[in-house]
Image (tube, helix red, strand yellow):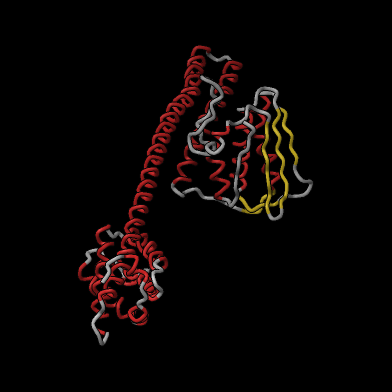
């Protein structure tokens, strides 16, 4: 009898193919019982997970044996079987053992249920078909494993890089925070000393009191922003949402931004609808969003620049755009400007003030109220 694989594959084994298809449930039951006894991994998985592609595999195996050498179908199922076994935690040796157990179960069953002995060619045909399935499964298992490991390694590298970047931004933030808090403290300390030395000069006291009030307001704003970030991170921020006219929130924000804007001689253009533009939101937080956006625009727009705010209705949504003719945002920063502790560099040693948390607050406050925010710039 020839043992040439091509000759074996070219044969038709309709009888054993029909038995495998007809009695696949019995074969699967016997395989599952034996696999659970012999395979460490098989003992810990759910029965349905253990069987995965085997019913379809036996169906296609029977077809392959009956159709003279067409191995494509049962090998395709074996290809999927390899991926499933990887995800379930099978080792490569356990994957191969799957098919070896199946070979013994199939041959034993055929020998028991047929009223004659199996021909050598039939035994070889079953063995060859299962060897083809093993080869396909092993190749796919190794290929899939390598691909998954590469993805994990790439993910680990990206995660490590993200951690390094987060650590860099944190250190930069702490340095900026120290600088921002020191800036108001020095004038406050100096003012107290001047008050002590100046005696009862009302004009001096008035002027120093106004300056101290500005510095305390600045420090209060910094601390409140930090507290807001902490509250949002811990899901402790309470929103008091109600029906709000968006036009009122924009106008109040513009008034609060006026001192900074006027100190830079910026022109502000407001374009809002003549009729109410109602939204369901927390008005104070909505004003905070627009103040932060206007402050950010003022910081990064040269003196004498233009800032524009327009509000429109777009279907069921209200859309607000804040634009300026400032320095622009580098393309590589557009996806990061809403990240915590992120600031845009304007030059080798030039920075606008701030902690890099204003736009983070804007995004989180907008999202918490069901909105979205995006940034665009020509660079």
| Residue 176 % position (x, y) | 46, 27
Residue 28 in the image: above or below residue 99: below
Q: How many marks?
A: 0
Q: Is residue 48 left or right of residue 375?
A: left
Q: In the picture, residue 95 is in which quadrant?
A: bottom left
Residue 96 in the image: above or below residue 366: below
**In-front residue for pair 111/298:** 111
Q: Residue at the bottom extreme?
A: 115
**In-front residue for pair 204/379:** 379
Q: Residue at the front extreme?
A: 1
Residue 118 in the image: above or below residue 125: below
| Residue 131 % position (x, y) | 30, 64
Q: Residue at the top extreme?
A: 197
- Which residue sits at x=48%, y=19%? 186
Name the quadrant of the C terminus.
top right
Name the quadrant of the N terminus.
bottom left
Residue 276 in the image: above or below residue 160: below
Q: Is residue 59 left or right of residue 112?
A: right
| Residue 167 % position (x, y) | 40, 34
Q: Is residue 102 left or right of residue 235?
A: left
- Which residue sits at x=54%, y=29%? 344
- Which residue sits at x=54%, y=34%? 333
| Residue 274 % position (x, y) | 79, 46
- Which residue sits at x=37%, y=46%? 150
Q: In the picture, residue 171 is in which quadrant?
A: top left
**In-front residue for pair 221/175:** 175
């Amino acid at each position: 009898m020839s043992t040439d694989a091509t000759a074996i594959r070219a044969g038709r084994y309709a009888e054993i193919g029909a038995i495998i298809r007809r009695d696949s449930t019995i074969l699967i039951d016997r395989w599952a019982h034996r696999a659970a006894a012999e395979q460490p991994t098989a003992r810990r998985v759910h029965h349905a997970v253990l069987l995965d592609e085997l019913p379809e595999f036996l169906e296609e195996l029977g077809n392959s044996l009956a159709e003279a050498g067409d191995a494509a179908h049962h090998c395709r199922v074996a290809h999927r079987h390899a991926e499933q076994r990887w995800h379930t935690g099978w080792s490569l040796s356990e994957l191969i053992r799957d098919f070896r157990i199946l070979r013994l179960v199939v041959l034993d069953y055929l020998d028991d249920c047929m009223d004659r002995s199996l021909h050598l060619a039939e035994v070889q045909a079953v063995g060859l078909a299962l060897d083809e399935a093993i080869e396909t499964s092993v190749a796919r298992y190794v290929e899939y494993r390598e691909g998954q490991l590469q993805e994990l390694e790439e993910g680990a590298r990206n995660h490590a890089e993200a951690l390094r970047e987060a650590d860099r931004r944190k250190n930069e933030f702490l340095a900026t925070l120290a600088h921002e808090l020191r800036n108001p403290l020095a004038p406050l300390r100096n003012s107290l000393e001047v008050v002590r030395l100046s005696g009862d000069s009302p004009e001096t006291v008035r002027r120093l009191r106004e300056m101290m009030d500005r510095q305390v307001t600045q420090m209060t704003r910094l601390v409140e922003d930090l507290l807001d970030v902490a509250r949002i991170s811990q899901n402790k921020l309470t929103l008091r949402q109600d029906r709000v006219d968006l036009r009122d929130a924009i106008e109040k924000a513009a008034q609060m931004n006026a001192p900074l804007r006027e100190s830079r001689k910026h022109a502000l253009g407001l374009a809002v609808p003549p009729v109410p533009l109602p939204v369901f939101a927390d008005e104070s937080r909505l004003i905070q969003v627009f103040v932060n956006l206007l402050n950010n625009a003022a910081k990064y727009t040269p003196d004498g620049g233009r800032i524009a705010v327009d509000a429109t209705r777009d279907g069921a949504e209200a859309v607000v755009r804040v634009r300026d003719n400032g320095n622009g945002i580098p393309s590589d920063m557009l996806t990061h400007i809403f990240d915590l502790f992120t600031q845009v560099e304007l030059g080798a040693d030039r920075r606008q003030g701030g902690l890099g948390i204003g736009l983070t607050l804007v995004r989180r406050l907008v999202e918490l109220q069901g909105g979205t925010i995006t940034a665009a710039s020509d660079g």
